[in-house]
Image (tube, rainbow, N blue to C red):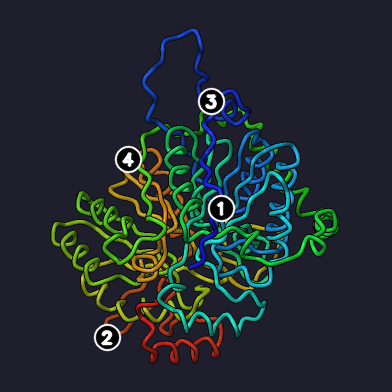
Amino acid sequence: MYFHKDRVVSYAISPDHSVPLAKLFDIPKLSNDSPPAKPSTASKFLAIHNNDDALAWRIALIEQAQNSIDAQYYSWHTDISGQWLISKLIEAADRGVRVRLLLDDIHTIGTDHRMATLNRHKNIEVRIFNPFKIRWPLHLVRAFELLWNLDRLNHRMHNKVLIADNVTSIIGGRNIGDEFFGLNKSFVFRDLDLLVSGAAVEQLSYSFDLFWNSQISKTARRLIAFSPARIDFRLMKRRLNKNLFLSRQIIDRIENVKNNLINNPELKNDLITSDAQVFYDLPDAEPIEEKHMVHDLYQCNIHTKKQLTIISAYFIPSKVFIASLQTLLNNGVRIKVLTNSLASIDVTAAFTGYERYRRQLLNMGVELFEFRAEPKYRSTYSASAINVDYLSLHAKSIIYDDNSVYVGTLNLDPRSEKLNTEIGLFVKNTELAESVHRAFIDDLNKGEYWQVKYNDQGKLIWQFADEIISIQPARSLWQRIKKTIYSLLPIQRHL
């Protein structure tokens, strides 16, 4: 590991309740004349299902920020949404906002020059989590380094958090990329975020600081070797503006969505107030015993009495998790799992891990629902102006008895449980839990999922209402072939 002595430790700026975002979300301003009050532990939440809303809210938070923006992401693409959000971060930095951008290194190949250029701004600092040493923009070279140093480089930061002024945040399943906001021409994700204000934001900032100041997070200015002569910030801004001009129709549409959201007179009434717990893994935790997220979620499962609804894009349950589900089933708890079908999943290899457990789960009594890939079944949550080839589920949420809900970045698979770092919010609130549950049940009722079950002959079928198919849905013959190949490889623990 390469640690630089001049790396500056920094922390979240204390929240200022007089900033516009605090007023927008009705966070009370403390008076200098009144005696100090006990800090409120309550937060306010709004579930973000719609992809347009998810992008619009991110733009709004960055535009409204006055003091600081902290962004922590597993993946940040250089497409329309990625470039637009980068341009907004630059605008914020130009007006004096401190910007800290922390990115995992697994998807940064070919972006070193852009990160080094951003880092030249006096108000922007970029750090990279657990970086590759070889910075050549060649996928083959990176693949060789990954295989050579698998124990270290397989540990990735899967967190996804945007924090503005330490008073408002967005946390959930979405990375930064067109497929997460309904703009990708190949496929679009159905996902879920929480818009958060209040006490939980300071807990999210504490987690961000742990990762930001970890020795695993490296400063871009030292890691990426570009001479100042090769870095032209003005040229970067001109290129961004040119690219965004070509996407003016999309940008204007999202701008209209954003203005409607922040000017909505019912916004404060739509916010749900409740206490919350922030669950997160430590940045350099090893071995598996230090993974906090899995332990915390298992503890939540124990207290379920009637119904457990699991929404997980990649669902590969461990033996321990299967045992906990069996205990719940024995106690009369109804369990529903919503995950991807082979046709809808974006990572075919991950499906092979789930497929191994599908019959066992059905035999236990778990109700299985698999997302439908056909665009004609897309809901308003995935609506966009782009006609896509297929839809995919990317949300990560668990609803307990319709009175508590977890929303975050953790999939119930070996990679999330043992290899990646994750973060999420557990909110014990009936109104929020019911609203999240209702949205996914509406998807079920509209036919956006197949229910997987046995027919009278004991064979698997995929059914919605009177529509039944007996062959596993897939996007192509080639995908079926890849699935078969992956199922023969010893890759289970890496999925």
Which residue corresponds to the image point at 55% horizontal and 25% vertical from the top-left? 17
- Mark 1 Cα shell of 10 Å, populated few (<14), some (14-19), many (≥20): few
Contact, CB < 8 Å: mark 2 with mark 3?
no
Vertical placement of residue 260 versus 70, above or below: above
Vertical placement of residue 442 versus 33, above or below: below
Q: Position of residue 141 (x, y in %)?
A: 60, 83
Residue pointed to by mark 2: 457
Query: What distance separates the C-alpha of mark 4 from that of mark 2?
Result: 43 Å
- Mark 3 Cα shell of 10 Å, populated few (<14), some (14-19), many (≥20): some
* Of pointers 4 and 2, the one earlier in the residue sequence: 4
Contact, CB < 8 Å: mark 1 with mark 4?
no
Residue pointed to by mark 3: 26
Which residue corresponds to the image point at 51% horizontal and 28% vertical from the top-left? 269
Query: What distance separates the C-alpha of mark 3 from that of mark 4?
Result: 21 Å
Query: What distance separates the C-alpha of mark 2 from that of mark 1?
Result: 65 Å
Mark 2 against mark 3, which lies toward the viewer? 3
Q: Amino acid at mark 4?
A: Lys
Mark 4 against mark 2, which lies toward the viewer? 4
* Of pointers 2 and 3, the one earlier in the residue sequence: 3
Task: Assign a secondary structure to mark 1.
Answer: loop
Residue pointed to by mark 4: 428
Which residue corresponds to the image point at 64% horizontal and 36% vertical from the top-left? 65
Q: Is residue 419 left or right of residue 108?
A: left
* Of pointers 1 and 3, the one earlier in the residue sequence: 1
Q: Which mark is residue 7?
A: 1
Q: Is residue 383 left or right of residue 467?
A: right
